[in-house]
Image (cartoon, rainbow, N blue to C red):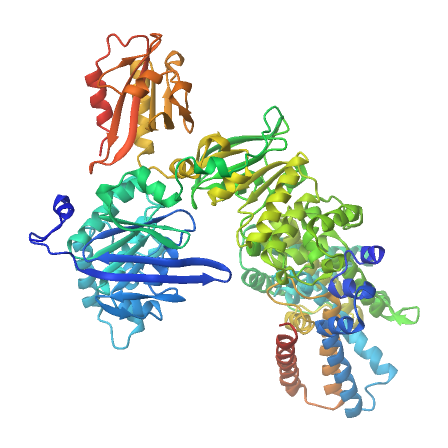
Amino acid sequence: MTAPSNAAMSTARTGAARHEPAVLLEAIDVEKSFGRTRALAGATFDLREGEIHALLGANGAGKSTLSKVISGHIRADAGKLVHKGEPLHLRSTRDALSAGIAIVMQETTLAPDLSVLENIFLPELGTSGFLSRGKMRRRATAILEDLGQADVLSLDMEVAKLSAAQRQLVEIAKALALDAELIIFDEPTASLSAGEVERLFDVMARLKESGRSLIFVSHRLEEVLAITDRVTVMREGATVASGLETHSLTQAEIIRLMVGRELGAIYTEREVAPDAEGEPVVFEVRNIAAPPVVHDVSFAVRKGEILGLGGLVGAGRSETAEAIFGLRPKSGGEMWLASKKVDFRKPAQAVRAGVGFVPEDRRVQNIVPDLSVKENLLLAHLGAHRGFGLGYGARQKKVDELLKLLDLPGHRLFDASMLNFSGGMQQKIIIARWLLLEPKVLILDEPTKGVDIGTRQAIYELLQKIAGEGVAVVVISSDFEELLGLSTRIVVISDGRSIADMASSALDEEKLTLLAAPRTSMRKNTAVLSALAVDCGGAGFWALIDEDDLICLNSVVANPEAAPGFSSGEAKRFEETTIPKSLASRGQGFVTEADGSRSTLIVPIRSHRGHDFGWVGLTVPGGAEGYSAEEIRQRIESLNG
Amino acid sequence: MVEQTNTASGADRSQAGASSTNGFDMGTMFKRIFTRLEFRMLALALLIAVALSFASPYFLTQTNIFNILDQSVVIGLVAIGMTFVILTGGIDLSVGSVAGLTGIVLGLALQDYPIPVAIMMAVLAGAGIGLVSGILVAYFGLAAFVVTLGVMAIGRSLAYILSGQTAISGIPSSLSDIVYTTILGIPANVFFLGVMYLLAWLYLTYTKGGRTIYAIGSNKEAARAAGLSVLFYSILPYVVSGAFSAVAITFSIAQILSADPLAGNLMELDAIAAVVIGGASLYGGRGSIIGTLIGVLIMVMIRNGLNLMGVSPFWQGSAIGSIIILALLVERLVSSRTDR
């Protein structure tokens, strides 16, 4: 019995007498570059047999690239993989599959017109010999029974008709049909409902019990804490924390590792963008919804302000912008441009009203390759232009101005294709396409994606200059550092909802990451909070509480007299709230403030594995007479686990 | 230089390149001209003309040249509409049967109405059929190939039903004036073809609609995001194509004074071939109306030359097919060397 003490603590471990668990796969100093971008720069990772290992990191940290190296989709430039003590050379996914390594990706790789059964055995269609349908059917049934899912999935169903969760199950069964011992789950819960996530976790637990090793790639910290045994954190392509035991970590520690900066360090480095307070609001959107991704997004942007839309990849930021611009149907919401109500059902309307939009994908959504550079520059003009001819002449003066601004020699306008320019110059031309129209609002989706560092700075300066001239600029970016440096205010979008609207001076990368993290428990908590607030005639909140400040994740105020002085998405110091005493003491019962106006009960929330999920509070007016702290505590604790 | 570039504003790439020569050395300019597909195809057309003039002394006579131009009118008009459609990345297989149907409409209308009214009715019928195809393709998102294949079958069947399965004769002979009068010494139908190509070139090069058609074919999503009217200008080419089919068959009927329900059979293949030989990409966004005109001339010249040499009509299909494939193959090999 040489089991380490922490392993003994873990109740999830199977097997009575465990030795130091054997390492199934090791990745050592893996490097990979795509063009000039270094996706992996010394990634190291080790996976034990029979564990669920989380691979974490911010947007672009390299976790997906590393998964794809391990699954043979991508060949690394340097570094090695060691599988069961032997070096492993993967030239293709087929090599990985024959080594027992499979990946379940967010975008499934199933053949939609074939049946579930045919898809499960799809890899075998590539091998020689005859296939026995009867044998395949028996094996598939056995696999699904092992997963406890035989009732959920009929083998004869056409894959095109399956839900996202069912498709995922087919992918898992497909991996098992190949006797995979190592299964990578890349963001598997992104498109699942809460119930489906539970079911997936049940499947993952069964896979683990059967001795398989799983890698779980996710942004969702709650889920990582709930299901995994160990955690590896990546940042900027390198491993910054390898194989930490999950139960020894808190959310805050993990975020600190992901962000990699000590609290407060950013304040001193950053020059805060000029405040646009006092300027009129140019553009406001309220409660925009565009299913299935965008549920409820609101924000307002002032004249001369750069507003950041932050969030994780897949949170619905691009979809929000597309819905605003009329590129995607909306199911609800209202918009005001210069105090006039507007509704853009197609982009032409938005363009003519003075809204510009630079979509994320340059090649697919911006560049028209068969038109000359000049015509690309004038494309939005053509969209706004009313009349039969081209009207290019009327824009000539502005074109010349822009050329100077972009540092582009005039004759290059006649280049046959924009594709010969660098990514940065392409982006500058696309931005100039909109500047030509002198828009009131300019929305840019990931404006520095695929742009080299030097040109990035030029694009920042360009955006600042535009804002200085009075344009309301909205920037969507997954690079939180960029967002903090560039924007005056930041609206955080998570799971298709705008959940915070804060001055960027009050934020740092850590708080932003915390706010952006999608919360599986959000809906359930909101329901409990509203019920509590209404039943008690007070206000409920859910917050992460530090030593002398807090970040409010959600709040429901049923009685304004009990308002705690902060609302959803705000970060405040205790003394800025109306309940500083309660926040500081967090006692067993209600704590009444010094002025006697409010009393608050604050209860910690823990997951069933004991992880800190923050605090839930109930504030009531006056001295809390007639309230049973114990009963309320019990109601709040029903949220636990 | 600014003034010069200004005048070239709407022009496609070669115009732009050529009009700002003082910014370039001559070498660059020649390279630009020779990398243009139309110029290579023009060279091919001249080569074929020279070869045929050796094969048949009659080929380069004035009579035969007018013959070739005369034979280019019908297919040339259809190819204008086909160019519009192909530039957006679509295809129109129905042009032949729409020509057949609108020919019958013209024939029937001429029994009751004066010539201009009857022609107008036929053209409106063609445009109307194009509108239906365009809406099905652009609004409902059906595949252009399938929609126009369906319209092709319907059009031909309606042509037979309306005509009572026989050709309509008794067309007023004054209709033939649109072919046999001359304008500035040029036969009216050839003159009309020239004017139509000029208008189509001006439209595609110097108007919002024309540039939108190119942008849609090149990158529909980017065109939409820039606020261009993608739906309208995706439908318009099918309307243009339908209308030109009707105009084309009008010229054909004016020559033979009879409207046959079978007229225009396989015309779509000639039109598509001409557009493709003229350098258009079937994926859209690339091609030009000048190229199409050269493509039409190449097709007609080859057919004419083979006739002059007495090659059996049964062999002509093989010859023309081979030359089309060969031209494209050579073009692909050449362009893959100069473009990269």
Residue A621: x %, y % from top left = 34, 10
Return the residue nearer the eye: A238 or A195: A238
Q: Vertically, is B237 above or below B327?
A: above
Residue A361: x %, y % from top left = 54, 52
User: Is B119 left or right of A219, judged from the image as shown?
Assistant: right
Return the residue nearer the eye: A436 or A464: A464
Q: Vertically, is A435 above or below B320?
A: above
User: Is A229 left or right of A300, judged from the image as shown?
Assistant: left
Q: Quadrant of residue B150?
A: bottom right
Residue at 65% across, 85% down: B319
Return the residue nearer the eye: A66 or B147: A66
Q: Vertically, is B285 above or below B272?
A: above
Return the residue nearer the eye: B11 or B270: B11
| Residue occupying the far right of the picture | B184
Count of labels in the image: 0
Residue A523: x %, y % from top left = 33, 32
The quarter of the image holding the C terminus of chain A is top left
User: Is A322 left or right of B248, judged from the image as shown?
Assistant: left
Q: Quadrant of residue B41?
A: bottom right
User: Is A278 left or right of A191, judged from the image as shown?
Assistant: right
Q: Is residue B170 visible?
A: no
Q: Is residue A115 visible?
A: yes
